[in-house]
Image (cartoon, helix red, strand yellow):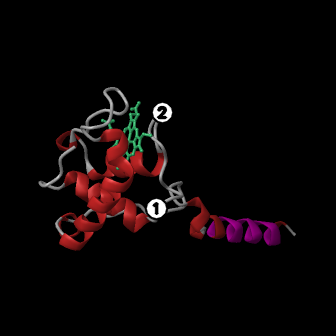
């Protein structure tokens, strides 16, 4: 019985790890920001689109002052941006349930790209 229940517990853990509903939580594979990804024009274009549609409203230079901080991309690692985008933080909404991992990686790559501006 003991053996059986620990096998069940192990199965449950595997289920949690593989669960897409936990996207943004600990169940998701950590993203790998390779130079290739960060410089891929298709990725950057997708990221820019998300930025314009969802982020500029609060972060852009036309947002009213104080709505959201002007981003300082050179100070961030891609992992930091990705974490904020996925989980949110205080006034920053979480996007983990809105965008899949690829999309969140794309907007991160865009913010880190040389062409990005607030
Ligand atoms: C509703 C307004 C709002 C929207 C929309 C929004 N943000 Fe934010 N964001 C904030 C606020 C407010 C903060 C500051 C949170 C804090 O640290 O107190 C923030 C913080 C951040 C940070 C961390 C900045 C730092 O220096 O700590 C990043 C990165 C970021 N946002 C990226 C994005 C991206 C990418 C999007 C679009 C997917 C987005 N934000 C959409 C309001 C917003």
Identify the mark at residue 90; answer none if there is no mark: 2
Q: Does the beta carbon of the residue at mark 2 sit less than 8 Å from ligand 1?
A: yes
Q: Give the Cα separation between the discs numbered 2 and 1.
A: 19 Å
- Magenta run includes residue 9: yes
Where does the C terminus fall, quadrant-wise?
A: top left
- Residue at image coords 58%, 60%: 22
Q: Pointer 1: what residue? A: 99
Q: What element carries label 1?
A: loop
Q: Position of residue 72 (x, y in %)?
A: 21, 38
Q: Does the beta carbon of the residue at mark 1 sit less than 8 Å from ligand 1?
A: yes
Q: Position of residue 17 (x, y in %)?
A: 58, 65
On the rendered structure, is 29 left or right of 73? right
- Residue at image coords 57%, 67%: 20
Residue at the left extreme of this rendering: 114
Circle 1 residues within 10 Å: few <14, some 14–19, many ≥20: some
Where does the N terminus fall, quadrant-wise?
A: bottom right
Residue at the right extreme of this rendering: 1
- In magenta, the rendered stretch is 3-14
Above or below for 108 versus 43: above
On the rendered structure, is 52 left or right of 39? right
Instruction: Tell which quarter ligand 1 is in.
Output: top left
- Residue at image coords 25%, 39%: 71
Q: Where is residue 25 in the image (x, y as percent from the top left)?
A: 53, 54
Q: Position of residue 32 (x, y in %)?
A: 31, 64
Q: What element carries label 2?
A: loop
- Residue at image coords 54%, 58%: 97
On the rendered structure, is 22 left or right of 85? right
Identify the mark at residue 26; answer none if there is no mark: none
């Amino acid at each position: 019985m003991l053996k059986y229940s620990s096998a069940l517990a192990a199965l449950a853990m595997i289920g949690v790890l593989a669960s897409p509903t936990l996207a943004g939580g600990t169940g998701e594979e950590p993203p790998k920001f390779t130079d290739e990804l960060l410089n891929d024009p298709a990725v950057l274009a997708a990221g820019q689109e998300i930025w314009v549609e969802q982020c500029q409203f609060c972060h852009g230079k036309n947002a009213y002052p104080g709505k959201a901080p002007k981003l300082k991309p050179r100070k961030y690692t891609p992992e930091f941006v990705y974490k904020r985008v996925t989980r949110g933080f205080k006034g920053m909404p979480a996007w983990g349930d809105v965008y899949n991992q690829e999309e969140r990686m794309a907007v991160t790559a865009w913010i880190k790209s040389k062409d990005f501006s607030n």
